[in-house]
Each structure stands twice: as structure tokens, then as C-alpha cells.
Image: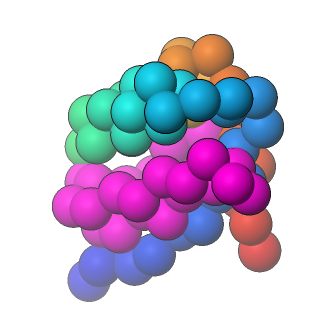
């Protein structure tokens, strides 16, 4: 069953930041679709990925993320 996880992401400042973050999120096992926005700084991830793995992928890209509950 596919789910949707929303992340608040801090630190992105440009289109390159968005693309880099999206690439890292897409590489997480279980991710089927990713939308990343610069303003207000967030992502919507669809699939069966682990939320901790998503946060780690954003951190690896150089930004901070928290689950938007």
C-alpha cells in the first residue's frame, strides 16, 4: 500500500537545491514519486519508504527535514 509523507525542509535556496534534494529522495528504496518545492521549502513523497530514511536522504543533500504532521 502506497502512502504519502510530507516533509518540511530548511536550507534550500535555489533550483539546484531542489533538484539535488529530489534526486536524493528518489534514491530511497520504496519511493515511487517525489515533489520538492523551494517555497515554502518542502517535499511530498509517495511510496512505501521509511520516514527516517527520507530524513537521512535530505540530510545527505545538506539540508534539514522534519515530518510535516
* Residue 25 versus residue 66 in the image, above or below: above
For this rendering, which residue is in front, 60 or 23? 23
Q: Is residue 42 rendered magenta in the image?
A: yes
> Residue 58's x, y, as percent?
56, 31
* Residue 22 versus residue 12 in the image, above or below: below
Q: Quadrant of residue 64?
A: top right
For this rendering, which residue is in front, 19 or 33? 19
The quadrant of the image that shows the C terminus is: bottom right
Q: How is the image coloured?
A: rainbow
Q: Residue placed at 45% from the left, 75% from the top?
A: 4
Apparent side of residue 10 relative to residue 39 in the rendered image (left or right) = right
For this rendering, which residue is in front, 2 or 9? 9
Apparent side of residue 51 relative to residue 47 in the rendered image (left or right) = right
Q: Is residue 69 visible?
A: yes
> Residue 24's x, y, as percent?
37, 30
Q: Residue placed at 68% from the left, 29% from the top?
A: 13
> Residue 65's x, y, as percent?
71, 41
Apparent side of residue 32 relative to residue 23 in the rendered image (left or right) = left
Q: Quadrant of residue 11?
A: top right
Q: How many marks?
A: 0
* Residue lying furthest front: 14
Q: Is residue 51 rendered magenta in the image?
A: yes
Q: Residue placed at 74% from the left, 66% from the top?
A: 68
* Residue lying furthest bottom: 1
Q: Is residue 48 visible?
A: no
Q: Residue placed at 49% from the left, 65% from the top?
A: 44
The quadrant of the image that shows the N terminus is: bottom left
Magenta range = 30-55
Amino acid at each position: 500500500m502506497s502512502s504519502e509523507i510530507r516533509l518540511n525542509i530548511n536550507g534550500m535556496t535555489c533550483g539546484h537545491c531542489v533538484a539535488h534534494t529530489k534526486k536524493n529522495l528518489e534514491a530511497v528504496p520504496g519511493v515511487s514519486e517525489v515533489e520538492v518545492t523551494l517555497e515554502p521549502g518542502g517535499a511530498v513523497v509517495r511510496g512505501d519508504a521509511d520516514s527516517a530514511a527520507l530524513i537521512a536522504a535530505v540530510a545527505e543533500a545538506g539540508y534539514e527535514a522534519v515530518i510535516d504532521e
